[in-house]
Amino acid sequence: MRVLVSALLITCAIQAHGFEQLPSLVKPGFAPSTHELEGGLWMVMANAEEDLQRSPLLIDRPDLNRYLMDIVCRLVESYCGDIRVYVIRTPHFNATMAPNGMMQIWTGLLIRVRNEAQLAAIIGHEIGHYLRRHSLQRYEDLKMKATFSTVIALGLGGAVAAGGVSPDIANLASSVGNFALLASIFSYSRSHESEADKFGIQLLDTAGYDVDQASLVWGQILKEEDSATQKKSSGSLFFSSHPSPSKRLETLASYANDLTEHEQLHEQGATDFAQAINPLLFTVLEDQLNTGDFGRSRFVLEQLQSGEHDQSIVSFFLGELYRSRNEEGDRDRAAAYFRQAISSDSPTPQAYRALGMIELKNKNLDAAKARFREYLSLQPEAKDRKMIEFYLEY
């Protein structure tokens, strides 16, 4: 029944729940002719995708990719064969969708949504851009304004020789090494963003997710901005090309109010989401701390304390946050969080090492050695083993 309802949603424009449901402008299995304008864009994206697949920032975790693709297929089952999801190791809140079905999800986004429903809301929004062909519309607008070629240069390789790319696109050729920069030119109009929001929340509703979670994402982002040391999410293309979080919160809350007039599953999927993200959590939080934004990192970590993520890892990085700031009282704060991390049933090994270093600075040599031994017993192949063994010789 869900498949039937989803098919009706994306193929028919009907009135429901107080606003018009939007039809898809792309049929399943769609691929434009290489001699069409959109075909040229697809060839650009094909080259960019090949480059992305070789990027050292690409997260190669088949289990995580399967999880994300399951969400895509749940939202748009008829199109899940047309969409590919790539997780990019970048500590900012961002997701993008290319006109050929290539989706990027940045790791910074994964620690800023609280559950599967919130993640699905972002994915559904990006799918909305794809199914409404907003990239093509944006390109046509830029081409008319003669601004596209001044924004970015793209190498098209053999695409020109194949006859699939028009000369005006071919003149952009130089490099396809920065798809994120390419994505930034598709800063959609307000009408595009409104359509993508409306399309995405309808997909969320049809898939049985809690539609209220779509607006809650933006409430969380607003609170993070208030806490941030560096405002306006510097480095995030998402904030440079999307409406303000406050406006998005208001709009999506209104849509959710219309859509909750009928019975639905109201699923959030917090446990499944945490289980999917936990294997990557240490790396993602390490990258977040390396941004150097104390306020933003503290907000993200404190929010994770109330979730179902690995709390030993969360506590360890709260300790690292205060240890690295090193203001008055921070050493004691850090030690308290490290102790929380090692009190877990599955303690984070690095927390023992961190506590050992603190004990060493406090001149508690026996306590430091005990922590170092525990660290090495859990991490026998630790890269810093020789240094720790040096400390143990004293």
Image (spheres, rainbow, N blue to C red):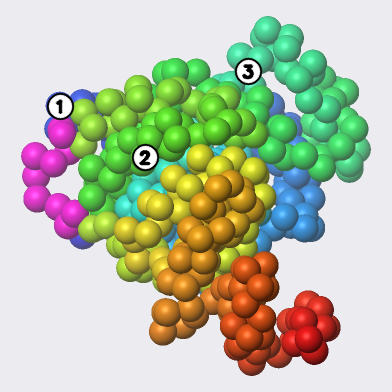
Q: Secondary structure at mark 2?
A: helix
Task: Tell me what residue is drawn at x 23 percent, y 42 percent.
Answer: 212
Name the residue furthest front: 363
Q: Which part of the image, by quadrant, shows the C terminus?
A: bottom right
Q: Which part of the image, by quadrant, shows the N terminus?
A: bottom left
In terms of secondary structure, what is the magenta stretch mainly? loop
Residue sitting nearer the eye, 221 or 160:
221
Badge 1 local density, few (<14 within 10 Å), some, or many (20+)? Answer: few
- Hey, what amino acid is under mark 3? Glu
Residue sitting nearer the eye, 169 or 277:
277
Q: Which mark is residue 140?
A: 3
| Horizontal and vertical percent position of residue 203 | 32, 45
Q: CA distance from mark 2 to mark 1?
A: 27 Å
Q: CA distance from mark 3 to mark 2?
A: 35 Å
- Eye-nearest disc, 2 or 1: 2
Mark 2 or mark 1: whose residue is earlier in sequence: 1
Q: Secondary structure at mark 3?
A: helix
